[in-house]
Image (tube, rainbow, N blue to C red):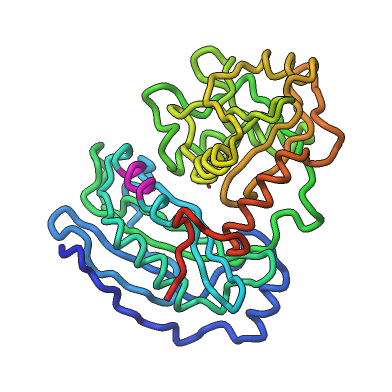
């Protein structure tokens, strides 16, 4: 029950041999390779948080009646560990992930995890699996998550949960340099409504978005853009990234919080841009206006942002019955500059004046 819970460390008895690990790291794929360990903490209504462990990564044994399998009580986070100059290992604003995890937990009627425990789980896992952090432009993607493990078919918040963090080495998202992506604007499906779970990072939001993402791919696009649920008119965000627009005068705007996921990349870019005197507004923006503004030249660049891709320029927009292009097939100058600055900060190449970078001891 104590918040000063310490992790019992049980190192794997079958760690991946170094040569095999090096071969996996050299592949640099996303989400298919995993490190040797995981962090787990159990929660029950009676005992609170207990049994914090760093142990060998292994399948869970869960009851077929586990509540997550029926009613979907599940939340997650996404963050990265970087290997910088002199083998310095860093995390970027991990306290923001801990805070958002608890905001998601509260919305999904799940127990909150003390922020210090969230951070210790992530850091202890990174420490034991530090040889899995790729150098260069790669990183170690960290996936903290929590699910309802109680075997119970009644409908109420579960009385038993499992928290876990796993880690996956990832290569450079844009292997051949950042290339603008094509997006599909879904005018049929929406991901979030007022009062719903749009601001929570829960698996259910992704389950609901996959059909639209599949439609995007059928239309030759990499990502889907969602409009609001009430009017199918206001731009919200992509399946897993927020969206920014650049005006011809260099100012920025992005869609407001509410039904979108409050991205840490989004918040960081707003702060970075404002600190350089760039005007950034958070405002509602209709799909019609977007088209008109691109056609008239008022909007010159558009980009998506999130932990995985950092900043990805949007070059083409397709929808039922039409399409339009933005820019000349390259990332625009404002997008590229912001991308370089954020990457520089995250990788410790630019001075961190805001206390955003956390170095692991
Ligand atoms: C995680 C996520 C984002 C991006 O958040 P970051 O904190 O910047 O990684 C954006 N939209 C959705 C739907 C997400 O799940």
Q: Which residue is rendered at x = 57% and y = 82% of the image?
A: 16
Q: Looking at the picture, how far across and down is residue 286, in whole percent?
A: 61, 16
Judged left or right of residue 160, residue 341 is right
Q: Is residue 100 magenta?
A: yes
Question: Outermost residue, right direction?
Answer: 328
Q: Is residue 120 above or below residue 11?
A: above
Magenta span main SS: helix
Residue at 65% over, 59% down: 30
Q: Residue at x 70, y 45 (%)?
A: 337
Q: Looking at this view, is 320 or 3 the one in front?
A: 3
Q: Residue 174 falls in which quadrant of the image?
A: bottom right
Q: Quadrant of residue 82?
A: bottom right
Q: Among all residues in the image, which is located at the extreme front?
A: 277
Q: Residue 247: image x %, image y %?
A: 70, 25
Does the magenta segment cover residue 143? no
**The image quarter in which residue 170 lies:** bottom right
Of 232 and 94, the residue lying toward us: 94
* Foreground pick, 230 / 316: 316
Q: What segment carries the magenta color?
A: 99-105
Instruction: Give the residue at x 59% y 41%.
Output: 276
Q: Residue furthest left?
A: 46
* On screen, residue 77 above or below 58: above
Q: Quadrant of the C terminus?
A: bottom left
Compared across the picture, whether 232 is left or right of 103 comes to right
């Amino acid at each position: 029950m104590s918040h000063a819970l310490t992790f019992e460390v049980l190192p794997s008895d079958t760690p991946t041999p170094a040569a095999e690990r090096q071969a996996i790291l050299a592949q640099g794929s996303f989400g298919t390779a995993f490190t040797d360990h995981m962090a787990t903490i159990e929660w029950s209504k009676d005992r609170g948080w207990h049994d914090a462990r760093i142990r060998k990564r292994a399948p869970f044994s869960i009851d077929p009646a586990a509540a997550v399998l029926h009613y979907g009580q599940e939340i997650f986070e996404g963050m990265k560990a970087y290997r910088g100059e002199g083998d310095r290992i860093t995390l970027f604003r991990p306290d923001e992930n801990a805070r958002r995890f608890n905001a998601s937990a509260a919305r999904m009627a799940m127990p909150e995890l003390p922020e210090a425990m969230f951070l210790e789980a992530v850091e202890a896992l990174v420490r034991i699996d530090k040889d899995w952090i790729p150098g260069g432009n790669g990183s170690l993607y960290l996936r903290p998550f929590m699910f309802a493990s109680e075997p119970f078919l009644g409908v109420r918040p579960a009385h038993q949960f499992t928290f876990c963090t796993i880690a996956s080495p990832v290569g450079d998202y844009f292997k051949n340099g950042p290339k603008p992506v094509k997006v599909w604007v879904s005018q049929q499906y929406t991901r979030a409504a007022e009062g719903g779970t749009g601001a929570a990072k829960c698996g259910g939001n992704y389950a609901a978005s996959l059909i639209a993402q599949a439609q995007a791919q059928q239309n030759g696009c990499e990502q889907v853009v969602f409009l609001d649920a009430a009017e199918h008119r206001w731009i919200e965000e992509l399946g897993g990234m927020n969206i920014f627009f650049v005006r011809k005068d260099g100012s920025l705007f992005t869609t407001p919080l509410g039904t979108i996921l409050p991205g840490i990349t989004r918040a960081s870019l707003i702060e970075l841009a404002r600190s350089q005197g760039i005007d950034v507004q958070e405002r509602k923006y209709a799909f019609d206006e977007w088209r008109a503004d691109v056609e008239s030249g008022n909007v010159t660049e558009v980009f998506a942002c999130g932990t995985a891709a950092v900043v990805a320029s949007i070059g083409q927009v397709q929808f039922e019955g039409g399409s339009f292009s933005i820019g000349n097939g390259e990332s625009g100058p404002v997008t590229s500059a912001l991308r370089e600055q954020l990457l520089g900060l995250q990788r410790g190449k630019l001075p961190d004046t805001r206390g955003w970078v956390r170095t692991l001891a």
